[in-house]
Amino acid sequence: MISVKDLKFSYGDFNVIDGVSFVLNRGEILGILGPNGSGKTTLIKLVGGILKKKEGKIEILGKEIEKYSRKELARKIAMVPSDLGAGFDFTVYDMVAMGRYPYIGFFDTLTLRDFDLIEKAMLATGINNLSRHSVREISGGERQRMLIARALAQNTEILLMDEPTSNLDLKFQVEIMELIENIRKTGRGILLTMHDVNMAVRYCTRVALLSKGKIFSIGPPDKVINENSIVEVYGVSGKIIRNGDGKIVYILPEKIQ
Amino acid sequence: MKSGLLLIISIVLFFFSIVFSLEIGAVSIPLISVMVKLFHPGNDVYSIIIWQLRMPRILLAAIVGASLTVSGAVMQGLFRNPLADPYVTGTASGAALGATISMFFGFFYISIFFLPLFAFVGALLTTLIVLLISSISGSLKSENMLLAGIGTSIFLSAFVSLLLYLLGKDLLTVFYWLMGSFSGATWTEVYIMFFVAIPTIAIIGIMSLDLDPMMLGEDHAYSLGIDVKKVRVIFFILASLITGLSVAFSGIIGFVGLVIPHIVRILIGPKNRHLIASAIFIGASYMVIADTISRSISIIEELPVGIVTSMIGVPVFLFLLVRERNYWG
């Protein structure tokens, strides 16, 4: 669905993304992991077309990203940004309805099909009872679900999410990840960045460890995450607890290297 | 409140404000005469007062009120800041400087069209300079833009004062113009506003769907298919155009662009299509009523309309603000 080759991006002389290549397949969750400043968010923004690459190639559904208009791109990729600029008092319903904006022109109004998709997205994310609430009145977890609902209403094959579980307590983290897993089962491809290695190991089909703008390793979590890669990428040694089948159960960071 | 209901109320209010304003003034005209002379004008005093004096003034006030309100709504959306309006962002000061330059160098006396032209160019250049300054300091953050706008605004106001000081003889007229007034309104100004400002407002209204995602921030806007840079430039040009024209023909009338959009937002929420539709008529009615008060409160001399707009509007605004605490989050 997404194919990235030798991608480079820099702010001035500083190479934030330095030759990254990967693919995202249908029906998988690819988690981008890495310490702060490793370039996770920049990578997501490049793939989402928010930032313009300096070098390399990004293909979305077989077509180079530059060949899409903004509206066309928004019908292929929906993005869930990490923060919500809630300077204004939109209702939850209005926010989710904005997911349909890439499909409507200046002279159009929402059609029955739009309303149907908004409704379904709100049901799937369990926020249908909040529709009249202001975005300011709802909890962090509800807010995250609302942004995911908006992305679902956008009805795209690819979803990008920047830190979908950050600032949420444990219950909401699990809730959001279960929701994302359910979305994956519908055959969509999901690219997300994560801080929490344990959550990533549990839910991602594959993970990519990003370090200083380069991919250190990429593959199934049980292969990529090990004592060595944790030290190399995060600069901390840790214990990795595996079950009988060799599957990672828990990563316990121990000592700064 | 339902947005459709508010739109109907605001349209009704708009027509009532026009009729009310036609009746009232140094000479009060009974409602029945207003109605008769509106549809069957003659050469009598009432017809002349209605069609030559009051109507152009009312229509100019209405279009300026609508322009400033829409411009304010656009700026608040683009800057993602409830404090933004054409005055804070420097747009209006640029327009005032442009207009003052046209007077200072005498272009204004060659043709009336130079005044709005200079004001528009001043408004647009200032907006572009503010955008440029705020983008040098990093990405186009709304806080940077506001600070750059306020700084530029103060700088340009000093220039306006300097030119006025040098202008000397016509100081009082220009000073009066700067304080905001519709007293010199003629049909020519109404026509210019009618053929330029109204279509511009209509375009903004049509495009206003794109403002909703812009209010959530760049990342959201991009991911919802908005070409952020293009949309931002288009809105800035359109808002500068109507602000420039308004300042050229009526001087500096603060408050309306800042507060009317907020009042409408408190009543029906922030969706820009609904907001702008109602705000056009509420802004227009508000300016018509304020101007009527400014010209009828004293028969010797008119009050600058800016004083009236602030003195009535601010208490209403503060009342709504206290009542709707949630509005500010």
Image (cartoon, coloured by chain):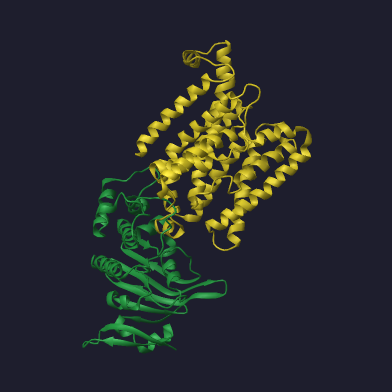
Q: Which quarter shows the N terminus of chain B?
A: top left
Residue at 57% across, 10% down: B44
Residue A117 coordinates in the image, percent (x, y): 27, 53
Residue at 37% across, 78% down: A208
Residue nearest the observer in this picture, B309 or B60: B309
Q: Give above or below for B227 relative to B72.
A: below
Side of B168 relative to A6 (left or right):
right
Residue B275 coordinates in the image, percent (x, y): 42, 41
Residue nearest the observer in this picture, B162 or A42: B162
In yellow, which chain? Answer: B
In green, which chain? Answer: A
Residue A36 coordinates in the image, percent (x, y): 45, 75
Residue at 53% across, 41% down: B257
Side of A222 relative to B139 (left or right):
left
Q: Give above or below for B113 relative to A89.
A: above
Q: Quadrant of residue B249?
A: top right
